[in-house]
Amino acid sequence: MEHSRAWWQERSRVFLSECARLIESRIGGETIEAIFLCGSFAAGEETVVLESNPVILLSDVDLVVIVKTLQDLFAWSPRRAELGERCEALMPGVRFAGRVDVGVMLAEDLKRLPARPGVYEMRARGRVLSGNARILDLIPRYAPSDITTREALILVENRAVSLIDSRPGKLREEDAERYGYWYRIARVYTDIAAASLSIAGAYVSGYAAREDLIRAEVARDTEGILAKLVPPEMLRAIERWTRFKLEPSIETALVRPEPHAFKDLWKDAAGHILFFWRQAASLALEPRRDIARPLPVSALAGRAPNWRDWRNHARGWREYFARIPASRRVVLAAALGRRLVSQSPLDAARQESMKLLEHRLTLGADTPVRGAKGGFPYHGGDWEYAAAELCSVWNALVFGRADG
């Protein structure tokens, strides 16, 4: 039986309330200042497949818990995955293709969040589920023009990792896998849309609103930055996959389910990511450069060190080193050298993902991969193995779970 959107909204409202109560019971209400919801769920734009049985939730549920002390932060940050899995168990009749992702922060951390699309959305459309109803007021109120090209590129790099993690070789035939595959393709294009508008200083909330604005601006100024970053074929893909993101179904996917069709979709999305990333990253490094001749990936990856955040970078590596054998720490630290303070582990993984994606498109999966420096986030050898290694490292860093 196909469920209605109204049925789902009521079900998700109850679920979110139950998640907040569970987290309070686990951590302790006296320890928590607030719990709030962000991401597509907060905006009412989550992707859920209502035509399947069971219903498939494709979007992540992004919850943020604001704890009161640094000790509480240290105690619960490593247990994020446990909290998320317990929340998922509260909705047994729904298949989670995404996850419940529980972030743990201090109120002071909100004041220091940078200008990026996700933070803009968090401030504008976040929903407090319990605790301090004014907690979101601590987040800086950024204008669209405050979002930097680097932050826009991070969006696309995140999607590159996700695309590698959904490579055709992993695809299974079940409906949930098919919808999940389409969803990851859709996110490539909705994030390219968000990134392109961020670079143009015109970011707006809402998937449909971003698609409409890009289409209008490209038609209005055929020589403008958006027209250069989003050529006609990519614009058509943004329109198609935005529809799927908002109303996921076999019909809106507009593709046949045969394996070769999935491979073609993956190759197209990977090519569009690389095209967009090279164009935008080249302009960021060399604003006067002819966009028709972007720099190669090898020249772009790692060319934007961030020395100002060296303390955060060092802390990120320290947390990563705590999870690997002592012998490996020494070898990796020596190989990385100054990158330990110029890049975070996530920054390094993002940019290495672009190299791995380019290798697959230009040389193929059968050509051996040259390992990343120090073997982080992948060693040399077979492309599939390197891809799996990269995604395992990424998922452990981002979600606290090796399987994402």
Image: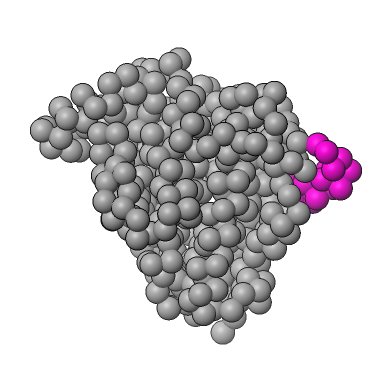
- Residue lying at the far top of the rendered structure: 308
- Residue lying at the far right of the rendered structure: 220
Is residue 60 magenta-colored?
A: no
| Residue displayed at 43% across by 78% down | 174
Please count the marks in the image.
0
Asked where in the image residue 76 lies, by quadrant, the reply is top left
Q: Nearer the viewer, residue 73 or 223?
A: 223
Is residue 217 magenta-colored?
A: yes
Q: In the picture shown, does residue 201 fall above or below 36?
A: above
- Residue lying at the far bottom of the rendered structure: 1
Majority secondary structure of magenta residues: helix
Q: Is residue 360 left or right of residue 224?
A: left
| Residue displayed at 56% across by 65% down | 265
Q: In the picture shown, does residue 190 fall above or below 277?
A: below
What span is colored magenta in the figure? 210-224
Where's residue 148, x and y in %?
62, 27
Residue 289 in view here: yes
Where's residue 250, x and y in %?
61, 76
